[in-house]
Image (tube, rainbow, N blue to C red):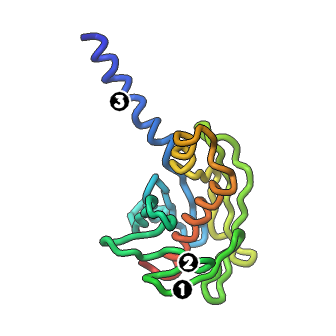
Amino acid sequence: MRLIIGLVVATALLAPRIAEACGVWHMKDVEKKVDVDWVINAGSIMNSKTKARLGAIYLDTENKAGMRVVKDRKVVFDFAGDKLRKYGKAVASFDDTSVTFGKRVYTFELSDGGDWHGFPSWKVVVKRGDVRVIESDQASALCAAAAAQAKTGAQLPHADQMKEIRLRIMFYLAWRELGS
């Protein structure tokens, strides 16, 4: 009986840590005063001051063609080549260091953030010109890194982890620029 109680207590205490280790990172839009908490398959967007929920970004992370944003079972944002699309129409172009919505160019700076629960993390700064727009101290590829390690025994290459972080940032910027 004590063993069962001990297992229940241990599970209750460790379960949140396992989920946290796999899938939560915080991003701040310092210009709009908005916080985004990324979990495994979604981003929750809140007012930094009041914590009122402003929106959500739901990710389809199991799509063979790559991660995309869905709403009511319809694809809202996805990628085709170097284009970010909204409902199938190109709305932005991107590369490894920037995304461009019309005349608005956002540049990404990812630098080493160290180790976060056994996985690499990055410090993120997104700028529009000289204006600092987004920052994060510990951006992570979330469960993509853990899933790759579970399948192959090897870590997901850093370039692929950084790509996942950039995609999430681009989805937020698309939500910010164009709405959902």
How far apart, in angstroms, are the residues tagged by discs 1 and 3? 46 Å
Give how far across and how far down residue 50 sits, in percent: 43, 62
Packing grade of label 2 (10 A; few <14, some 14-19, many >=20) is: few
Mark 1 touches mark 2? (CB < 8 Å): yes
Q: How many marks?
A: 3
The amino acid type, in three-letter code, at marker 2 is Ala
Nearest-to-viewer mark from 2 and 3? 2
Going from N to C along the chain, the mark reached first, 2 or 3, is: 3
Q: Secondary structure at mark 2?
A: strand
Residue assigned mark 1? 90
Residue assigned mark 2? 80
Mark 1 touches mark 3? (CB < 8 Å): no
**Residue lying farthest to the left in this orientation:** 1
Nearest-to-viewer mark from 1 and 3? 1
The amino acid type, in three-letter code, at marker 1 is Ala
Compared with 156, 32 (above or below) is below
Give how far across and how far down residue 4 sits, in percent: 28, 16
Q: Secondary structure at mark 1?
A: strand
Compared with 67, 146 (above or below) is above
Packing grade of label 1 (10 A; few <14, some 14-19, many >=20) is: some
Mark 2 touches mark 3? (CB < 8 Å): no
